[in-house]
Image (spheres, rainbow, N blue to C red):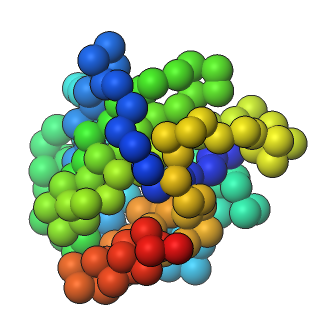
């Protein structure tokens, strides 16, 4: 089970010591709290099925696939996300996600928790902005439903609050 909360970033943290992880993610299906996607990062190629179970958590099933399978499957995908990740803390895990291409401008902090109680009790660092866990920008399965104009309007409305 994965338990995560997400925020927009108000102020960029220092990334000097953070390792950059480049993600390429392509979606086969994303509706009604379920997504099926393939992803590539480092030397890993995966197919993942993710089902939302509560406000903060989801059940995930991941299988490894070959680079050739990844390249073939991505030809039948309709939506893609490209982003860089930076792991900043380990307890709890805090990762900064910087989006590219269609979602350029989205910089999101994600915090992984061991329990829902820990997720509810978390005190945010000063560089975190507004929480977007439940917004259209909080989950990639919702983000891919937005075209560039809708994305920019949503981002703009959240940053003006």
Q: Is 7 positioned to the left or the right of 118 in the image?
A: left
Q: Position of residue 96 (x, y in %)?
A: 40, 39
Q: Is 24 positioned to the left or the right of 142 in the image?
A: left
| Residue at x 40%, y 43% (from the top left corner) | 11
Q: Is residue 75 above or below residue 67?
A: below
Q: Position of residue 16 (x, y in %)?
A: 27, 18
Q: Position of residue 75 (x, y in %)?
A: 13, 65
Q: Is residue 140 above or below residue 95?
A: below
Q: Looking at the picture, tell me which residue is in the foreground, 98 or 11.
A: 11
Q: Is 109 positioned to the left or the right of 130 in the image?
A: left
| Residue at x 26%, y 40% (from the top left corner) | 84
Q: Is residue 33 above or below residue 98?
A: below
- View extreme (top): residue: 17
Among the 4 quarters of the image, the one containing residue 147: bottom left
Q: Looking at the picture, tell me which residue is in the foreground, 139 or 60.
A: 139
Residue 38 visible in the snapshot: no
Q: Looking at the picture, tell me which residue is in the foreground, 20 or 17.
A: 17
- View extreme (right): residue: 117
Among the 4 quarters of the image, the one containing residue 144: bottom left
Q: Name the quadrant of the N terminus.
A: top right
Q: Position of residue 8 (x, y in %)?
A: 46, 55
Residue 106 visible in the snapshot: yes
Q: Is 112 positioned to the left or the right of 156 in the image?
A: right
| Residue at x 53%, y 46% (from the top left corner) | 128
């Amino acid at each position: 089970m994965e338990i995560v909360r997400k925020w927009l970033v108000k102020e960029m943290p220092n990334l000097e010591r953070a390792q950059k992880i480049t993600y390429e993610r392509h979606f086969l299906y994303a509706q009604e709290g379920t997504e099926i996607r393939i992803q590539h990062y480092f030397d890993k190629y995966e197919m993942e099925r993710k089902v939302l179970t509560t406000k903060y958590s989801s059940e995930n099933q991941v299988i490894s696939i070959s680079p050739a399978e990844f390249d073939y499957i991505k030809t039948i995908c309709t939506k893609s996300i490209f982003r860089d990740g930076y792991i900043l803390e380990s307890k709890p895990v805090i990762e900064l996600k910087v989006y590219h291409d269609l979602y350029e401008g989205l910089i999101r902090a994600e915090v992984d928790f061991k329990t829902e109680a820990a997720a509810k009790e978390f005190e945010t660092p000063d560089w975190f902005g507004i929480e977007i866990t439940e917004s259209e920008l909080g989950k990639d399965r919702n983000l891919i439903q937005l075209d560039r104009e809708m994305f920019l309007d949503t981002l703009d409305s959240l940053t003006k609050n």
